[in-house]
Amino acid sequence: MINSSARSDDAEVAMAAAAAGADVVRSLYGRRLARIDKGAGDFATAADVAAEKAILDVIRAARPDDAVLGEEGGQQGGADAGRQWLVDPLCGTLNYAVASMLVAVNVALRDRAAAVADPFGGEVFCTDGETAWVRRDGSDDVLVPSPATRLVDVNLDPPFPNAPGFRATDLLAHPDFVARFRPRVVSTTLALTWVAAGKRAAYVTDGGDLSGSVHFAAGIALCRAAGCVVTGIDGAPLGPDGRGLVAAADAETHELLMAMIRGRG
């Protein structure tokens, strides 16, 4: 157990903001909500918008001079602000819209603290940039990654910018993957918290530079602070030229997945 009073103020703000968003997500669950078309088959719901407002209310009250990049509201605050929060108020909107509880609320202070709330699991995962923990029922416990489950979550949602060189479906069909791992697909970055918490051996997704993504920044920060191995699908560090994401519980799991990905070419 961790003494929560020793946590950084930014981490507490992140946790409070994520929890506020989660409260909204829970309160509106199961209702017929208006949908806002975002193109390419994507949409937001009234819950996304309301949850983002609740999150921003917390951040603005605690950090009025900070900028915010929200999934729904875009960039807010001065472009010259020294600090920026990245907010995805409801990751897994398509799940939520059909009454699935596999969703997450992501709040990250770029390159610093971050929190991910599981609205229906009653947990808030957090990092101050150095350690990672989960708060449940008022108690904080350190996150400990483990490959023991052999479960690997693979994101199959488009776009697929690295095809045909990398296709997640090819990884799933790789003989070594079939022999060593069991795939899971939940279509929410909640799965990244599970890698940090030892509930998944790894998480894999296609994409570009995800380090500054409102969807992925919080989960990446958690995995790094917990001690996971985090790279792009090419094994390179995340950054401006990044390609997707591989977050693994340990070096051996990461090396196995990279060998399979590279073997595909």
Image (tube, helix red, strand yellow):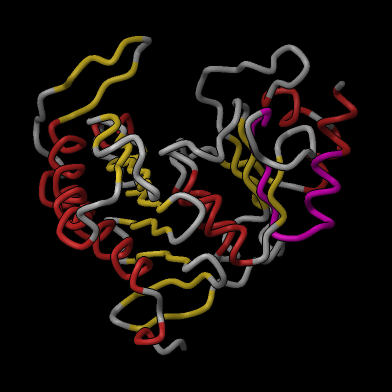
Q: Is residue 220 above or below residue 172?
A: below
> Given the current orientation, which residue lies at the most extreme front position?
80
The image shows residue 252 at horizontal and vertical percentages of 84, 57
Residue interval drawn in magenta:
241-258
- For the point 36% across and 66% down, the residue is 10
Q: Is residue 71 above or below residue 181?
A: above
> In front: 156, or 107?
107
Quadrant where the C terminus sits is top right
Asked whether 122 falls inside the magenta stretch, the response is no
Answer with the quarter of the image where residue 223 lies: bottom right
Left/right placement of residue 165 relative to residue 67 reads right
The image shows residue 219 at horizontal and vertical percentages of 50, 51
Answer with the quarter of the image where residue 144 lies: bottom right
- For the point 11% across and 44% down, the residue is 28
Answer with the quarter of the image where residue 95 lies: top left
> In front: 202, or 69?
69
Q: Is residue 186 above or below residue 17?
A: above
Q: Is residue 97 above or below residue 251?
A: above
Left/right placement of residue 246 relative to residue 67 reads right
- For the point 56% across and 40% down, the residue is 211
The image shows residue 26 at horizontal and vertical percentages of 17, 52
- For the point 67% across and 31% down, the residue is 242
The image shows residue 69 at horizontal and vertical percentages of 33, 37
Left/right placement of residue 165 relative to residue 13 reads right
